[in-house]
Image (spheres, rainbow, N blue to C red):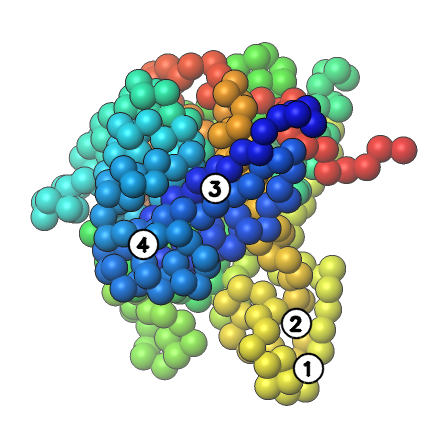
Amino acid sequence: MTPDTPHQTLRVAISGTGFAGDFTARAFQMIPHKNRVSIELAGVTSGHLGNARQFAGRHGVGEAFERHSDMLEAVQPHIDCISCANHAHAQYAMEAAEAGVPVIVLEKPPMIWPGYLEGREGDAETRKAESMDVLHEVLEAVEAHGSKLLYAENFVYVDGVRALTMLMREAEPRDKGKVLLQQGVCAHQGSHAPAYDTPEKSGGGALFNKACHPLGPALYLKQVEGMLREGAPVRPVKVSAVAMQVLKHQPHASGEYFRVMQQVDDYARLTVVFEDNTVAELTGHDLSIGGIRNSFSVIADFGQYDMRINPNDGNELFLPDAELAGGVLMREKLPTAQGTSFPVPRPFHAHGYVNELEDAVRCALEQDRYPQSGAMLAWDTLAVLMAGYESAEKGSPFIDISEYTLGRDFSPEVAPDPLLVEEVLERP
């Protein structure tokens, strides 16, 4: 923008007033406002209007609504953040597309099997097929109405993934840059969300809602690799998985420090094979007694990058008494600050939320810019997760998903552009 460019205000709408809605509102307020652009939190919606009003007062949101469609009509947002319970994702994304919202930020995982909302039962293979059909309809609506979908997998936006993307750009002219093996973990001792242990609302447990986190950058980095080397993303083609309920089958005393899931899996392992015969091994579980655990490791043909997202030992603190910390949270889900801990300053930056929403802002401002984590990533993620449950139900064989990942065409512009990724490593 030039100095004469008029001031712009981007209106943001948020659906959901729980954990995801809260960090969404707070992260928007951390984005540096540049080039005569300001961000207005214009509307929030919740199925309980009282919750929406409390949220609006807490975060300075312009107006509270009970219905998502009413909010879209009244606010006409530039960015609609769908941060509500998983069961409403598909409906809200469709409503946002039909309303012509320029940028739709869809929290992970993309959606749940529609049969849950209809009170039906179905095996995992049926759930996979029907879920992909609905997501196809959502993505068709997004494209038809000219919206852009940002699939809000914050792991894609952590600085470590950005740094590795930068290194892959440097390696490509030397005929390097192939990602060979990826390994990742997301774990804690049970979700905050009351709906988490209800498949009809959450869609699943550790596989669906934990392993999805490291899955995001694993899929993204293969897309980036393909774009750099061949001009086309590398896609996943088969999946093997385990999904179990561990704590439910242990003595009552074993669950004292955990939220014991009764209806969804609390341990999951995914093996994803890509079309170039490279591999990702991803784990999600609710068995971490010492707070959240997020890590991601990449072995490429030019080096190895290990990301200790949370915890990491960049900061170390010892407190003889937890009460000395007052109400300060050292890191997410840490049950006590007593003893030695590894604080994570600026956690919304460290976990990628600010980078993620800044991408949404840039996509709203720049007509030709599309999200780094976009519609293709949402599609491939759901295919892997649903096939993972099919594999687990059938005894962990590999399930071919190429009919989905290689069988659905995406417009070239929705693939990530690694040349647009901000440089986070210094040059001499």
Q: Which circle, 4 or 1, is nearer the viewer?
A: 4
Q: Amino acid at mark 4?
A: Ala
Q: Quadrant of the C terminus?
A: top right
Residue on which disc 2 sits: 341
Amino acid residing under circle 1: Leu
Mark pair 3, 4: CA separation: 26 Å
Q: CA distance from mark 4 to mark 1?
A: 41 Å
Q: Residues within 10 Å of mark 4 (few under 14, many from 20)?
A: many
Mark 2 / mark 1, whichever is N-terminal: 1
Q: Earlier in the sequence, mark 1 or mark 3?
A: 3
Q: Which mark is residue 197?
A: none
Q: Which mark is residue 153?
A: 3
Does 67 sit above or below residue 261? above
State if disc 1 and disc 2 touch (CB < 8 Å).
Answer: yes
Mark 2 or 3 closer to N-term?
3
Residue at image position (60%, 45%) is 31
Q: Is residue 313 above or below residue 180?
A: below
Query: In the image, what residue occupies the spot 75% across and 15% down?
Result: 173
**Element marked by disc 1:** strand
Q: Position of residue 397 (x, y in %)?
A: 33, 36
Q: Residue at x 66, y 61 (%)?
A: 345
> Whole-Å distance between the Cαs marked 1 and 3?
33 Å
Q: Closer to the N terminus: mark 4 or mark 1?
A: 4
Which of marks 4 and 3 precedes in the sequence?
A: 4
Q: Amino acid at mark 2?
A: Ser
Question: Quick one: quadrant of the N terminus?
Answer: top right
**Residue ID for mark 4:** 64
Question: For this view, does 284 lie left or right of residue 391?
Answer: right
Q: Distance of mark 2 from mark 1, alpha carbons?
A: 8 Å
C-alpha span from label 2 to label 3:
26 Å
